[in-house]
Image (cartoon, coloured by chain):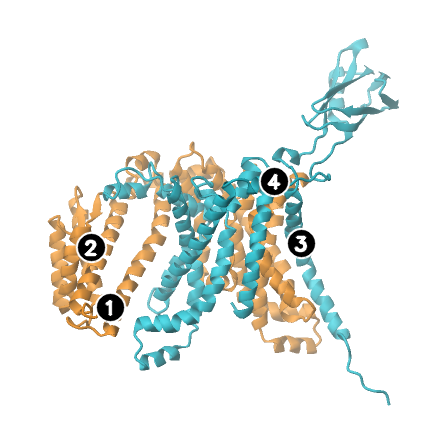
Chain colours: A cyan, B orange
Amino acid sequence: MSNAIPPRGPGALGRREARLAWGLLLPTLAIVSAVVVLPLLAIFWISFKPVGLADLRPPAPVVRESLRGEGEDLRLQYRLRNSSRDVPITAVTMSDTVPPGLTIRQADDRCEVTGAEIFCNLGDLEAGGRDEIEILVSAQGDPDALGELAEASPPVLTGNAPNILTNAEFTLDNFARVFDGDEFWGVLGVTLFYATVGTIGALVVGLFAAMLLDRSFRGQGVLRGLYLFPYVAPVIAVAFTWVILFDPFSGSANALLIRMGLTDTAINFFGDRPLALIMVTLFEIWRYFPLSFLFILARMQSIPEDMYEAADMDGASPFQKFWYLSLPQLLGILSVLFLLRFIWTFNKFDDIFLLTGGNAGTRTLTVNVYEQAFAVSNIGAGAAVAVVIFGCLLLFSVFFFKLISREEGL
Amino acid sequence: MNRLRTGYVTAAVLGILWTFTMAVTVAIAMSFLTGAAFRPALVWSAVFGALAGVACLRGRAGAGIAATGLLVAGLLGLGPVQTDDVGALSRVLGQAIAAGATAAGLRAYLRDLPPHRLTRHEFEDAVIRFLTGFGYVFFTAIVAIPFYVMVMTSLKNQQQLVQNPLDFSIDLSRGWGLFDSYVELMTVFNFGSYLWTSFYVAVLTVVLTLAFSIPGAYAVARLRFRGAAVFSRSILLIYMVPMIVLALPIYIGYSMVGLRNSVLGIVLIYPVTTIPVALYMLQGYFRGLPAEVEEAGLMDGLSRLAVIWKITLPLSLPALASVSLYVFMIAWNEFLLAFMLLDDPSKFTLTRGIASLDSSEIPRQHLMAGSVIATLPIMAIFLGLERFMTRGLTAGSVKG
């Protein structure tokens, strides 16, 4: 009798199930890694490269072909140019096919001719350099039509130019530029203010709204729907509405304040230094309080009613019930919401970009990515800022996963 | 402190606060409705508010007296709402609304409140009733005003806007001329095609997202395999990655491949931003479904895929509706990628189209009309299917 041994490792069925699971996950994994992981790696790569917006198109030889002259002097002319003004191109070659109707009489001595095929070896093309090749031909037929025919088949050009994105040139300049001077700390400070105050504000306002709606009355559904509007509407629509509402010259808010006698001159809400930051933070609170109110309301409605009844029996006053009963019950969801919203506000780009464009002391890290990459045309520096943001994100998510493990079941 | 907790003091303080709240509310509302000069007055609010609060302690008759007093004072120009040069009708109307709402509110807050010493309960109940009333007014105002301004600005013309930025009354004599901005957007600015592009991009995004996330969510929720826990964590992590960080390499990659400036590129990228959210939402729902039903199906000889198709999906239709709505909303509202990747006006989505209206040469009623065009469909869908939407939001919208 052999000894019975419990099976080790997954059995055949288990393996089949795991195979199926991976099969089902494969498309998602593939597409997510293609669009999330690859770009992230690219960002790290680019952040160490001296890349500008113009370098995205690598230097290449450019050619213009035309049929010139007439009779004995009829010739195909190729004018070449290096598209880059700073980088030379090496080993430039050109190949082309002469259309039927044209016969090659004499070619440039850098070119080889086989039948109607031309192959030219042009050597190096210096930065911003030009070159010209002429091939004498004779035409059977209308030269104009033949000329158009010749131009219709563009020659094929090859050449070696160093591509800044793929070569082995690395630099730390981008990071030096990002961390250089006071600007970075200013930007970081603005980002932290925006994220902290915006998140806490949205939570507090959302808590207030949730308490208002945590009772059943007629029209509760309508009000709940209405209070969700700021979150559901497209950000671009509401952001522009705010900009127009608070316009310093023709905005209604200024007209109202002046009429009420609260201010004599128009206030530039999105243009003055401390005020603009406060306004974008208020916008953030306004736009995202619906989210926290929805979560808090859902949690509130699941607090068992008998706890409150017991508190009533013990003579607790309404504020005491809120402070000693509701709040501790809500603490879990509040802390999860805080971290999550903090991360998201930290990452927020559209809102500030649309409201102020990052001017007047509202430039956050994310807006800085855009500024560096597109406004200053320094993609490398933009990528370096993005790497800094990603580092912060990793730091936050460590806290987040510690918390969510404790608070499982959001 | 406890000495001050008497009916009179509470009534007077709440009276001042509520009267001033109402004065500000009525002044703003009437200004926005008529364009005339309504002003709240702090000092008069304090004087009459305290009196009205105390009066409202005296039952219904007291409230009546308070309302009448406020109305008379207001019409004499001494009330909480100041009306300088305002038409007679809107003046009387405004004062009447202010007086009525103030008295009715105070009456409700101070109901059953004894004039002298209050217990902690009575005091806190009154304060909470006041805070509730204040909350409704406050939230309704902050939510409604921007949308009101958006709609009304889009119905004006340049001249009216410059003349009085406060005047949001509608000039009905213009008839269809009210919708000039919309007509111009549709005809000159090609907004019809933007609407269509946005719509089919959003629908394609929903379809692709579901196609990818349903199998993924099912695998994470139901099947046992090594790494399931890690996987469901990393989904959450992925949708915390800021879009701008990804947008930069995507822009570079697309520039090189030639997908930039094409709707195809947009349709390829949108689902990826929504798949993690959808997967997270759906796996939560699949976990809640009873596994027994599916096991019965397996026993009867269905394959796993047939079980998903014939049992799980029909059971999770409500969740699919929520997820679809939520994904549709994200795709419809998406701005950053459309802004960075699309340059050709014939391929714009709606949000990109609105961004192109933001220039000093284009009058701002057009900008607002564009905003209304983008907001209305999503609002209509949202109000019609609010139940699904709310559930969808609470299930997965940690994303903003």
Q: Which disc number belongs to residue B271?
A: none
Residue to which mark 2 is pinned: B98
Residue to which mark 1 is pinned: B126
Image vertical order of residue B263 relative to residue B142, above or below: above
Spatial CA distance of label 3 from label 1 is 57 Å
- The residue lying toward the viewer, choosing from B76 and B8, is B8
Which kind of residue does numbered mark 3 sit on?
A: Ser
Q: Are marks 1 and 2 on the same chain?
A: yes
**Residue A265, x across and y down, in percent:** 28, 37
Spatial CA distance of label 3 from label 4 is 26 Å
Image vertical order of residue A333 relative to residue A94, above or below: below
Q: Element under label 3?
A: helix
Residue at the outermost front position? A181
Task: Locate the N terminus of chain B and report the quarter of the image it occupies.
Answer: bottom left
Query: Which residue appears at 68% of the width and 67% of the height?
Result: B305
Which kind of residue does numbered mark 2 sit on?
A: Ala
Q: Are marks 3 and 4 on the same chain?
A: yes
Spatial CA distance of label 1 from label 4 is 60 Å
Q: Residues within 10 Å of mark 1 (few under 14, many from 20)?
A: many
Spatial CA distance of label 3 from label 2 is 60 Å
Q: Which quadrant of the view contains residue A306?
A: bottom left
Mark 3 or 4, nearer chain start: 3
Which kind of residue does numbered mark 4 sit on?
A: Asn
Q: Residues within 10 Å of mark 4 (few under 14, many from 20)?
A: many
Which kind of residue does numbered mark 1 sit on?
A: Ala
Residue contact between numbered discs 3 and 2, judged by CB atoms under 8 Å: no
State left or right for residue B19 relative to residue A139. Answer: left
Q: Which disc number belongs to residue A174?
A: 4
Q: Is residue B380 visible?
A: no
Q: Is residue B306 visible?
A: yes
- The residue lying toward the viewer, choosing from A205 and A219, is A205
Q: Which disc number belongs to residue A33?
A: 3
